[in-house]
C-alpha cells in the first residue's frame, strides 16, 4: 500500500498558520503555527500516524530553509512548488508554499514509483484550491478545525488516486 502525507503550513492576514499533511492511504493534518495544534487529521491506516507527525515536523525545517533562500532572491515571483524536500529510506517528502505562506507537505512512500513530479504538483494545486475554498467560507473561523465535506472529499479522491 503506497503512502503519501501532505502538510499545509502558513499564515494569512489574521496571522494564523496552517499545516496539512497527507499520507496516501492516508493522513491529512492541519496545524496552527502559533500553537501547532492539528486543524485537520485524517489517517488510514492510523498505525503510522505518529511516525508521520515526526516526518512532517522535520520537513518543516527544510521548507523554512527553502522559503528563506527563495524569498531573498525573488519574494513575489517564486515558484510555489518546492519539489522534493528530502528523501528518506521509506519516504519522499515534497513541499509547496503559497504566496500567503501556507505550506503543504506531501510524504510519499519511496516504493511508489507511479507518482510523478507533475502529479504531485497537481495534487498540491488541488489542495491549495480546496484549502482556499475553506478559508473563503464565511462560517469558517481561521484556526478552527477544518470540517468541510468538500475538502474531505477532495482529499479522499487524491488519496485513492495516489494509492
Image (tube, grey):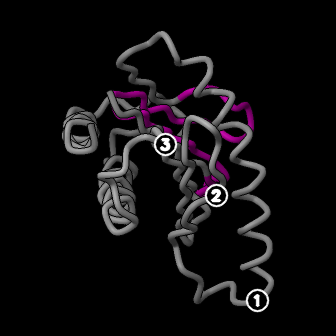
Which stretch did the figure color magenta? 10-38
Dot 2: few (<14), some (14–19), or many (≥20) neighbours within 10 Å? some
Residue in front for this viewpoint, 30 or 106: 106
Measured in 3D between alpha carbons, the distance from the residue under mark 1 to the one under mark 2, in whole angstroms, is: 19 Å
- Which residue does the image show at 57% across and 44% down from the upper left? 18
Mark 1 lies on a secondary structure that is helix
**Relative horizontal placement of residue 88, taking residue 79 as reference (left or right):** right
Figure quadrant of the N terminus = top left
Mark 3 lies on a secondary structure that is loop
N-terminal label among 3 and 1: 1
The quadrant where residue 69 appears: bottom right
Q: Residue furthest top?
A: 47
Return the residue at label 1. Answer: 73
Front disc: 2 or 3 = 3
- Which residue does the image show at 35% across and 63% down from the upper left? 125
Dot 1: few (<14), some (14–19), or many (≥20) neighbours within 10 Å? few
Q: Is residue 153 above or below residue 63?
A: above
Dot 3: few (<14), some (14–19), or many (≥20) neighbours within 10 Å? some
Residue 110, label in figure: 3
Return the residue at label 2. Answer: 85
Residue in front for this viewpoint, 1 or 8: 1
Amino acid at each position: 500500500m503506497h503512502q503519501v502525507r501532505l502538510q499545509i503550513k502558513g499564515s494569512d492576514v489574521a496571522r494564523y498558520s496552517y499545516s496539512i499533511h497527507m499520507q496516501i492511504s492516508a493522513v491529512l493534518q492541519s496545524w496552527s503555527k502559533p500553537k501547532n495544534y492539528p486543524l485537520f487529521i485524517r489517517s488510514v491506516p492510523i498505525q503510522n500516524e505518529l511516525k508521520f507527525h515526526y516526518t512532517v515536523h522535520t520537513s518543516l525545517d527544510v521548507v523554512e530553509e527553502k522559503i528563506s533562500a527563495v524569498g531573498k532572491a525573488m519574494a513575489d515571483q517564486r515558484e510555489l512548488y518546492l519539489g522534493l524536500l528530502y528523501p528518506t529510506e521509506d519516504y519522499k517528502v515534497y513541499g509547496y508554499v503559497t504566496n500567503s505562506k501556507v505550506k503543504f507537505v506531501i510524504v510519499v512512500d519511496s516504493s511508489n514509483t507511479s507518482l510523478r513530479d507533475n502529479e504531485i504538483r497537481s495534487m498540491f494545486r488541488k489542495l491549495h484550491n480546496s484549502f482556499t475554498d475553506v478559508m473563503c467560507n464565511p462560517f469558517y473561523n481561521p484556526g478552527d478545525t477544518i470540517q468541510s465535506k468538500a475538502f474531505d472529499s477532495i482529499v479522499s479522491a487524491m488519496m485513492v488516486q495516489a494509492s
